[in-house]
Amino acid sequence: VTAPAAAGIGQALALAGAVLALIAWRRGTAGRTLAWLAASMAAVFVTLMTGLVPGVARDMSARDLARYLDARGALPSQVWVVDERIGSLVFYLDPSLRRNLTPGRFDDVTYNVVLRRLATAPAGVLVAIDARETARLGRGGGLDDIKYDRAGRYRVYTLGALRDGLLPRVGGP
């Protein structure tokens, strides 16, 4: 996660507050020590909330994947999200589509589960994989040569496209 330059300023203020608290403590002024510690903690809190949390939320949420599914207008029979939880996907999904969710329609799976189900699951299942992870997948060949749609940080494959691209690599039918 990258943080804006303001996070560096907040870190410097937090450090300065901690140093001033240490100086006040050594001088025996408890009130000033407490005040500088409180100021330092406030700087840490503001830095985290404005500098780091937005980046973590952006890099860890499935908002873009939900928008991709919203734009389709109808949900596919199943959506598998590889190696991630699906909570933010459900949260950001358009309420009209969310009403149609049934148990098992969205599933968080491992890449090994995708490989095990590759030959037997319906071809129309959508499989969403963080694009940063696709290079290490695909049994050494990556997944770059398999057709996909982009949804923010995700690559969205149909299981049929993965089947056609991966079964020859993993020794399937």
Image (cartoon, grey):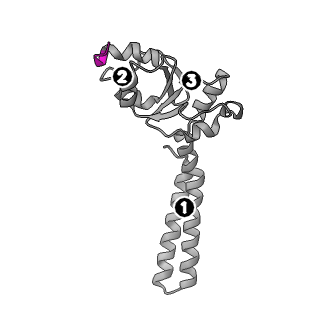
Give the number of the disc on residue 44: 1
Contact, CB < 8 Å: mark 2 with mark 1? no
Give the number of the disc on residue 142: 2
Q: Which residues are magenta?
A: 169-173
Q: Residue furthest bottom?
A: 28
- Amino acid type shown at disc 2: Gly
Mark-to-mark CA distance, 2 and 1: 40 Å
149 lies above or below 59: above
- Badge 2 marks a residue whose secondary structure is loop
Q: Of the residues under marks 2 and 1, which one precedes in the sequence?
A: 1
Mark-to-mark CA distance, 2 and 3: 26 Å
Quarter of the figure with residue 136: top left
Residue at 52% from the left image edge and 64% from the top image edge = 14
Residue at 53% from the left image edge and 69% from the top image edge = 17
Measured as percent of width and height from the top left, residue 56 is found at 53, 45
- Badge 3 marks a residue whose secondary structure is loop
The residue beneath circle 3 is 77
